[in-house]
């Protein structure tokens, strides 16, 4: 069974990540290009993108588990109604 606290923690992570993406998207192309000339910054960006990919995979797994939990609960309730 999926813990309600775990769901809340994951949703908070998703919201925080969404805010970070919004801030990143506000950066103008000129700013990005100017900053991307720094090799150290490029490595940080690559690392962040790798972390992002892992996080998206975790979100997908979490959503699949949540969907399964919700569907199982829904069908269990429907079966109880039929009995």
Image (cartoon, rainbow, N blue to C red):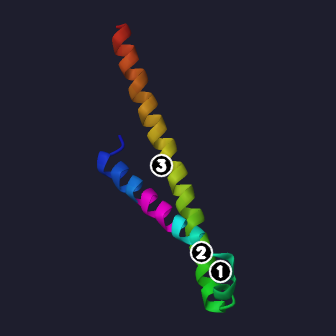
Measured from the top left, where is residue 3 in percent x and y? 32, 46
> Which residue is tagged 1?
32
Foreground residue, 70 or 42?
Answer: 42
Foreground residue, 38 or 50?
Answer: 38
> Which residue is tagged 3?
62
Which corner quadrant holds the C terminus?
Answer: top left
Could you tell me which residue is drawn at 61 percent across and 90 percent down?
40
Vertical order, 74 against 21 (above or below)? above
Vertical order, 67 against 54 (above or below)? above
Q: How many marks?
A: 3
Measured from the top left, where is residue 78 in percent x and y? 40, 16
Q: CA distance from mark 1 to mark 2?
A: 7 Å
Tag 1 or tag 3, which sits nearer the N-term?
1
Element type at mark 1 = helix
Q: Residue furthest left?
A: 5
The secondary structure that most of the magenta stretch takes on is helix
Q: CA distance from mark 3 to mark 2?
A: 30 Å
Q: Residues within 10 Å of mark 1 (few under 14, many from 20)?
A: few
> Which residue is tagged 2?
27
Element type at mark 2 = loop
Q: CA distance from mark 3 to mark 1?
A: 32 Å
Could you tell me which residue is drawn at 47 percent across and 42 percent down?
65
Magenta stretch bounds = 13-20
Measured from the top left, where is residue 5 in percent x and y? 30, 50
């Amino acid at each position: 069974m999926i813990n309600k606290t775990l769901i809340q923690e994951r949703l908070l992570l998703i919201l925080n990540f969404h805010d970070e993406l919004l801030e990143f998207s506000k950066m103008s192309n000129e700013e990005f290009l100017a900053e991307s000339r720094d090799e150290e910054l490029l490595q940080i960006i690559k690392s962040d993108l790798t972390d992002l990919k892992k996080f998206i995979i975790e979100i997908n797994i979490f959503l699949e588990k949540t969907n399964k939990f919700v569907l199982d609960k829904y069908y269990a309730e429907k079966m109880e109604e039929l009995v």
